[in-house]
Amino acid sequence: MKELKISIVLFILVILLVVVNAFYVNSTMKRLAALATEATKSASPEALSELFSYWETNRDIVSLSANLREIDSVTENLLSLKVALEEQDVDRINQSYVLLCNALDDVSRYERLSFGTVF
């Protein structure tokens, strides 16, 4: 009976960790998308700095559960957006922004809660 109780507690703990992780990753990706939109619209160095700072702060934690290919894609598209904003190339800014949003959605999509991701 003792083993059953321990098993149930561990199972609940694992499910709880999956849910917390999903919320964390999805909220981080939403915040990054909002910061990217702000940086693209304002093209200010402060907005771009805040975007990079937020990503650098959260990248290590997100990479614990997200595929490293998607993490690298987000980083590459952030760098591309930075260069485009610095050069004031409107076409590259738009392209980089769309690719960044797509990469953020890829990370978020794999961490959304569904029956398949939990079990």
Image: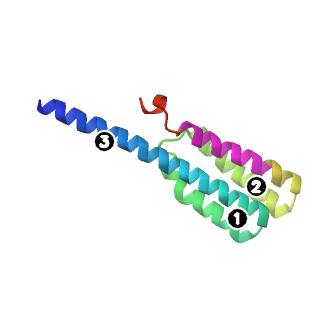
Query: Which structural element holds mark 2?
Result: helix
Quick one: SS at disc 3? helix
Please state which amino acid type lies under the numbered disc 3. Leu
Front residue (pair 90, 117): 117
Quadrant (top left/top right/bottom left/bottom right) for the C terminus: top left
Q: Which mark is residue 13?
A: 3
Residue identifier under label 1 = 48
Q: Position of residue 96 (x, y in %)?
A: 77, 50
Horizontal and vertical percent position of residue 94: 82, 51
Magenta stretch in the rendered image: 96-110
Q: Is residue 109 magenta?
A: yes
At x 43%, y 33%, the residue is 118
Count all numbered tags in the image, as a single digit: 3
Residue 18 painted magenta: no
Dot 3 alpha-carbon crowd within 10 angstroms: few under 14, some 14 to 19, many 20 or more: few
As drawn, the label of residue 81 is: 2
Assign the magenta stretch its main secondary structure: helix
Q: Nearer the viewer, residue 36 or 113?
A: 113
Residues at marks 2 and 1 touching, judged by CB atoms closer than 8 Å:
yes
